[in-house]
Amino acid sequence: MATATTNGTDVPTSTVPSTTVVSSKTRERPDFKDTWGVFVPVNTLDFWTLVHRVVIEEISPKDLIRDPVIKPGSERYDVDGWNWRDSWELDPHIILHTGLGPLTDKLECALKSVGKFTVHIEGLHRFTNPPKMIEGKERSWDVLMCNLPPKKNKVLFDLHKQACVISGKDWHFAEYVPHVTLAYTKFGAAYKYTGIEFGPIEIEVDHLMYQKYRDNTKPVRIDLQ
């Protein structure tokens, strides 16, 4: 297990390696309402133990914000403020594809045939969102996320490609960057945490989840062969 190391000071953005930032300036967020997605669950005890010991104890509460996509009226939304838990991704996962229709036999068989695999997680990155209008206000925020080294996670790219080809749905963004979201922070606040030593950790995956966007009430479990 790794230990947490930060210098406790703000570091100018220019000093942060470019590999710690995935820009979304060219992205337009699609409307995923009433669509489905396929996900790799990483909600394991080992993962949460590492997150709690290495990350949660290091992040200043003043840097956190509520997940900006949480909608008014949902059980996680509080008009008078936000619960600190809403700053964290409580169901950690890796997105393989989204914006899909209901699961087809052809796609399910293709995903199953990949078999069980291992996800390799090492280091922290950030995703920087450009300003967006949310609830009538212009907001910007950062997403702190776990890094998934491409050379050690080739299977994720293979699964993503299969989902694109079989579903006939291209990926919505310029490139596919698999990651595990950890927390939502104020704009520009996440970069100083990318220096935290996180992992390496390996997670054995024996199933995938296929479910509606932002609705985990009736997910379809896909057991890998």
Image (cartoon, rainbow, N blue to C red):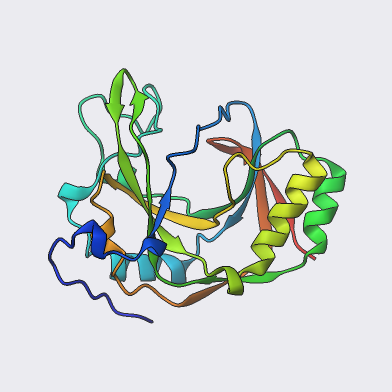
Q: Answer with left or right where residue 153 lies relative to residue 112.
A: left
- Which picture quadrant has residue 73? top left
* Furthest residue toward top: 136
| Quadrant showing the C terminus | bottom right
The residue positioned 17% from the left and 56% from the top of the image is 60
- Which picture quadrant has residue 168? top right
Does residue 205 appear in this view?
Answer: no
Q: Position of residue 93 (x, y in %)?
A: 53, 54
Nearest the eye: 48 or 123: 123
- Which picture quadrant has residue 77? top left
Give the tally of numbered discs.
Answer: 0
Q: Answer with left or right where residue 18 lies relative to residue 196.
A: right
> Does 136 sit above or below residue 194?
above
Q: Answer with left or right where residue 81 lies relative to residue 43.
A: left
Q: Position of residue 96 (x, y in %)?
A: 63, 51
* Furthest residue toward bottom: 1
* Furthest residue toward left: 9
The residue positioned 45% from the left and 77% from the top of the image is 200
Nearest the eye: 23 or 202: 23
Q: Position of residue 142 (x, y in %)?
A: 32, 46
